Amino acid sequence: MGSQYSGGDMGERARHLAKKSILWLALSLFLGLLLFAVILADSRSASAEPLPGGNVRAIPAFARKYGLPCSACHTAWPELNNFGQVFRDNGYQLMNDRDSPIWQNPSYWPITFRMTPNWHRERTNHQPVDGAPPNGSVVEQHGFDLSGMDVWTAGTLYKNISFSLLPSLDSDGTFGFENAFVRFDNLLNSRWVNVKFGKFELDNLISEKRFLFLSANGGFYQTYHFVPVGASNDFGLGDNQIGVELMGHSANSYTRYSASLVSSNSGNPGLPSNRTYDGYVTFSQAFQVGRLGLQRLGGYAYAGRRPTFSQTFGGGEPIPGTGLGNKSFYRVGFAGDLYILQGKWEFLPFFLHGYDNVFLGTATPANVPLPAGAQAPKWNGGFIETHYYYSPQLVLTGRYEIIRMSRQALTSNPSNLGDIDAYTAGYRWYPIMFSRAGLAWHNEFSLVKTAGSIPLSGNGVGSIPCTATCPGVWSQSLLFGFDFDF
Amino acid sequence: MKSITSVVAFFFGSLGLALAAGTTPCFAQIDIHFHAVTGPMEARVGGLTGHSSDGKALYRRFCVGCHGASGDGNGENAIWFDPTLGFAKPRDFTVAVFKCRSTPSGTLPTDEDLFDALTRGFVTTNMPEWRPLSGLDRADLVAFIKTFSLRWQTDKAGTPIAIPPEPPAKIESILHGRELFQKMECWKCHGPEGRGDGPSAATLTDSKGNPIRPYDFTTGERFKCGVSNRDLYRIFMTGLDGTPMPSFADTIKPEEAWDLVHFLRTLQVSIKTPELATFKQWVSAHPGQLKPIGQQAPSGN
């Protein structure tokens, strides 16, 4: 990693480091005391009798409805285990003839809130800062902060008619609908026919919406959002899409399939860019392997088109939703969810092969000649993620992710332009796990190396020019916070 | 570099504290004082052997919220289950009394019975189907549940009752079953039309004194202890221990139990059973020949 000190007075540097060290030690001490206070509070509770349920009357959405602990549906919330997956596949129903709202107490409040007050630090090197040397300088920010907030309601409107509505506020106050759909479950009295209509997460075999990472660099899958440097395609496998989904599953969801038809607008409402449709299919099969636990393997494919220009008015102003010159792209791959040690240690391998049409890859309108040396970019990406469930209340996490361009959009591009390596490690500790609310102490460190591009997290202000190969830009995120869900 | 050292120290330091906290009992319902009154238990289901030691963690993860840390059915959610609204209280494992058994009334169920109950769940209650758990996990849970009561050490599971082959569901069988429904006063709880609204329905309580509702055949697709005619036969002959539903093993003959099964299927108007079709056909061909079920009808007709 580079340093923001390229030379100068060593004494001043030492003084600066000493000052900084004191700041860091003070901060560490403060956070350590905070954590210790939580544990002390914990200990006091442990010495008392178990709390009667009547003392805890705050109840989040599904917990109040069904009275199951968080850990029944989640390996470690928000990640689903197989029981939670079956519940979700059934349309948020336990299928006990008590799912319909007519059975709920009128005071039932089917809404959950989730937010994470935190402290985080972002640090990116080789940044083209004003006055910096040719190889750039370090940019660093840190401080106490807030995550965005999710306000989620979901459940059943009637037996076998379910819904989900997830308005979310970003930390800067930007409002949007993360998802909003109605789902008709068990059509033809069969688990194999369920139809969802609206905005939803693609039925990814490894969900990015319910995973265990929160930091700026680690809080998303690079592979799910990657597009080649300079491409005009805005598609991300992790972006919720608007359309219709047909899905089916076996009684225990060991066998699952889904097929979706979605608008080619990358999940943005208002038909902002295009009028074509994309398709997505997945299939997975799980099987039990003795004491190792449940193993799942599956594959997926997404094929779509994106416009390269639009109808215009007023001398060149694009008319929304009138995309023209559509060009194709696809993403295909496979994923797994594997366990060892009686389900205590989980591995999530994922592989993706991506292709963008040459016009998309070079951001060239289809009615304009291609630049010299243009070719359709291709790449391979993937990750291996692991969770060790020390107990239902403590999970250790880690992930290594890699993306490699196999064909650049321009033959003149450096061969490693766009390549990414990402490392993340952390843990989540759930000091309380009632079936009515959740609190997690989250601690995560992530490190991403990008070549010739700004990190996808948005950290950094640019990248220094590539020559024969692109120099790596390293971006670190460190996050501590309390993730709560009520 | 010192800043990195501090960060790393904090990261691993707080992890160490969390690990230490994770090994000690903490916080409310996760402070599980497993009152295992017996030693390690096993459960044998088919080719599977479940171990209570493995079931403990699963119980903590999935069951403790309702059944409680001591297995006495007083988990943190128990107070929210209102029996007057039809939500049964969680099962108390410490008394080792179970509704769904293949064994005679008063005896312990087999491991398979408990395994099947876990797999099937209990319709119209908060006990879901645990089919998504592996067979081995369910067997481990059965083994662990058995650690809550000394009965599992002192008593043996009963011998499953024999279920003779089912005779054809002819109209004669259905009509005889209807006579039995009247004669044995099933209607007093289940109601003349099987709606669970008989004159005694409002007075019924389970063995713990909680109100309990008779089964409503007209809306139910599944029964508490299964879905098939054999399951229904088994319920008659074993009874549902801990509830007012008795065993009829000493009261009626096996062929009569089958007749009763066939008649009860005609009450399931929501799913249109073959028995209902047969019955309706006969009724339309013989108008006015059936006396209504209930108090007005002379006993035995």
Image (cartoon, rainbow, N blue to C red):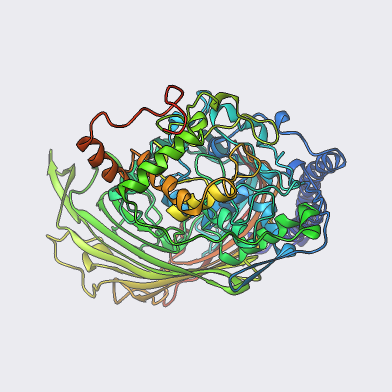
Residue located at (42% from left, 40% from top):
B220
Residue B294 x, y percent position in the rendering? 44, 26
What is the quadrant of the N terminus of chain B in the image?
A: bottom right
Left or right for A246, reference A109: left
Asked if residue A324 can be seen in this view, the reply is yes
> For this rendering, which residue is in front, B158 or A279?
B158
Work out whether A151 lies above or below A464: above
Question: On the image, which quarter does residue A282 sit in?
Answer: bottom left
Q: Does residue A209 appear in the picture of this structure?
A: no
Q: Which percent across, then down, holds residue A418? A: 41, 68
Q: Is residue B220 above or below residue A480?
A: above
Residue B115: quadrant of the picture: bottom right
Quadrant where the image shows the C terminus of chain B:
top left
Q: Could you tell whether A275 is left or right of B92 in the image?
A: left
Question: Which is nearer the eye, A336 or B139?
Answer: B139
Residue farthest toward the right in the current orientation of the protein: A47
Q: Position of residue A212 (x, y in %)?
A: 57, 54
Question: Which one is nearer the viewer's eye here, A18 or A472?
Answer: A472
From the top left corner, tell me how far across and down residue A338 is, in percent. 54, 70
Could you tell me which residue is drawn at 23 percent across and 72 percent down? A374
Tally the marks. Answer: 0
